[in-house]
Image (cartoon, grey):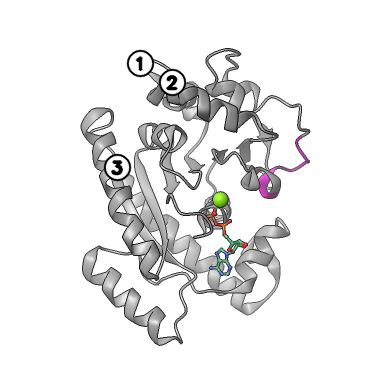
Amino acid sequence: MSAHVLAVCNQKGGVGKTTTTYHLARAGIRAGRWVLVVDLDPQGTLTTITAREEVPEDSVSIADVLSARAKEPLAGVLVPGVWDGLDVAPTVGENLGVVRDELVVAGAGREARLREALAPVAERYDLILIDCPPSLDQLTINALVAADGVLIVTQSKQASINGLVKLHETIEAVRRNYRPGLTIAGVLVNQHEQHTVSGQSWLEELRGAMAIIEPPVPKAVVLSDAAEASVGLDEYGSRGANRLAETFDNYLTHLEEAVR
Ligand SMILES: Nc1ncnc2c1ncn2[C@@H]1O[C@H](COP(=O)(O)OP(=O)(O)O)[C@@H](O)[C@H]1O
Ligand SMILES: [Mg+2]
């Protein structure tokens, strides 16, 4: 059995892709999965919170895997994650930004570099989560081409909703050209403010437009605090955090079903 590969996407920054990737990785570990997270955001936030030890700036990283020049096998850049069973394909320094620009002018096959790099290690894992950059660039395209399913993370706000149309078009283009089997595994509404009228009305609008994963992720400081402290929700030690840990377990179940 080869891993289920999920790309966590939205071209908008700050919607919660990295935080969601992090908590889903923990849910995978809780469920006994072998998990690999791939940090495809040049900012490297996911690497900072998921790597067991700080990854030095001059280390080999996912950039060296995707670059046309110094081709490193993916297995050569992996580092241990904060939990047993978790590995991280890290991003450090400025290199991934350089590779992203390189990919813009690269020739045929550039879209499939991540897919090809993952193939030799996919057997080792049950779940591979790719944290995408906040842009519909070649890195995001590489994530989509490598993925079985896309998890769209959004917020229940007008600006977020408008961006979803563009994202859907990109997913459709990737399906048509490179990856017919790519499915939308789910749309997760993050940082939902249950108690505001606008939050509620945007949520209703989203529900009308697409199937979203229920319930939405609430705006909750514990979600950012736990991630920043590299602690799982279930390890955090509060009732609210434990409830959210179970919510993420359910999200993972939903997503795994969707790409089965
Ligand atoms: N549900 C949430 N509740 C509260 N804060 C959140 C939530 N999701 C994300 N955040 C915070 O919002 C900010 C942006 O989230 P992040 O995951 O980095 O977004 P992205 O990866 O899409 O840019 C971070 O500071 C994060 O801790
Ligand atoms: Mg991010």
Residue 58 lies in what quarter of the image? top right
Can residue 175 be seen at all in this image of the molecule? yes
Disc 3: CA contacts within 10 A as few (<14), some (14-19) or many (>=20): many
Magenta stretch, main secondary structure class? loop
**Residue at x-position 51% and y-position 44%:** 133
- The image position of residue 247, as x and y in percent, is 48, 68
Nearer the camera: disc 1 or disc 2: 2
- The image position of residue 21, as x and y in percent, is 53, 51
**Residue at x-position 68% and y-position 33%:** 79
**Label 2 beta carbon less than 8 Å to ligand 2:** no
Can residue 181 be seen at all in this image of the molecule? no
**Residue at x-position 41% and y-position 71%:** 216
Q: Is residue 79 above or below residue 195?
A: above
Residue underneath mark 3: 171
- The image position of residue 63, as x and y in percent, is 59, 27
Mark 3 and mark 1: Cα distance apart in space: 19 Å
**Label 1 beta carbon less than 8 Å to ligand 2:** no
Q: Is residue 194 above or below residue 91?
A: below
Amino acid carrying label 1: it is Ala
Residue underneath mark 2: 105
- Write the start and end of the magenta stretch as one range: 49-55
Lower position in the chain sequence, tag 3 or tag 1: 1
Asked if the residues shown at circle 3 and circle 2 are in contact, with their CB atoms under 8 angstroms apart, the answer is no
Disc 2: CA contacts within 10 A as few (<14), some (14-19) or many (>=20): few
Q: Is residue 222 above or below residue 85?
A: below
Residue underneath mark 1: 108
Amino acid carrying label 2: it is Val
Mark 1 and mark 2: Cα distance apart in space: 10 Å
Amino acid carrying label 3: it is Ile
Nearer the camera: disc 3 or disc 2: 2
